[in-house]
Amino acid sequence: MVPVDFGAAPLVALGAAVVFDVPDRLVAGVAFGISALGTIVLRWLVRYRDRRELLTTPDVSRERARRLGGAAMWTGALLCLPLAGVLLGASESEIAVAALGVTAVAGLLIALAYR
């Protein structure tokens, strides 16, 4: 079986959205939704299925991997805040503030989990 790299798929999708003049709110909603779901699923694998090789830190202990997985799952859940702002019609500045807040809290959670 040949390995497939989907690394360029988001860029191709974004290019297609520009070409087909997709509304900005739809693009933002899909981006936040995929980011939230992807973060939760991947880190669930780390936390509950012991898939430590998915982490960028080499030779991480099982306990630290569980903490990092839990912090990343919280990050994915927090990404639902700006997603809700997009879906409920919040202003661009409110969505930006929510996204920056999620970034700050996620950084703190991951730093605490890494200790």
Image (spheres, rainbow, N blue to C red):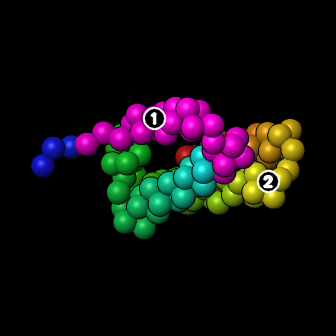
Q: Quadrant of the rendered structure where residue 7 is?
A: top left
Q: Is residue 15 above or below residue 87?
A: above
- Name the residue rendered at 79%, 39% in the picture: 96
Helix, strand or loop for disc 1:
helix
- Name the residue rendered at 47%, 60% in the picture: 41
Q: Which residue is mark 2?
A: 85
- Considering depth in this image, is 33 or 41 the residue closer to the camera? 33
Residue 36 lies, in percent from the top left, at 59, 55
Q: Which mark is residue 12?
A: 1
- Name the residue rendered at 42%, 67% in the picture: 48
Residue 14 colored magenta?
yes
Q: Amino acid at mark 2?
A: Gly
Q: Residue furthest left?
A: 1
Residue 25 colored magenta?
yes
Q: Residue furthest bottom?
A: 48
- Name the residue rendered at 36%, 61% in the picture: 50
**Do callouts 1 and 2 mark residues in contact (Cβ within 8 Å)?**
no
Question: Where are the magenta residues, as a range?
Answer: 4-29
Residue 46 lies, in percent from the top left, at 42, 58
Tell me: 25 left or right of 110. Answer: right
Residue 89 lies, in percent from the top left, at 83, 53
Tell me: 58 left or right of 33. Answer: left
Task: Evaluate whether residue 39 shows in this view.
Answer: yes
- Considering depth in this image, is 45 or 94 the residue closer to the camera? 94
Q: Amino acid at mark 1?
A: Val
Q: Is residue 12 above or below residue 80?
A: above
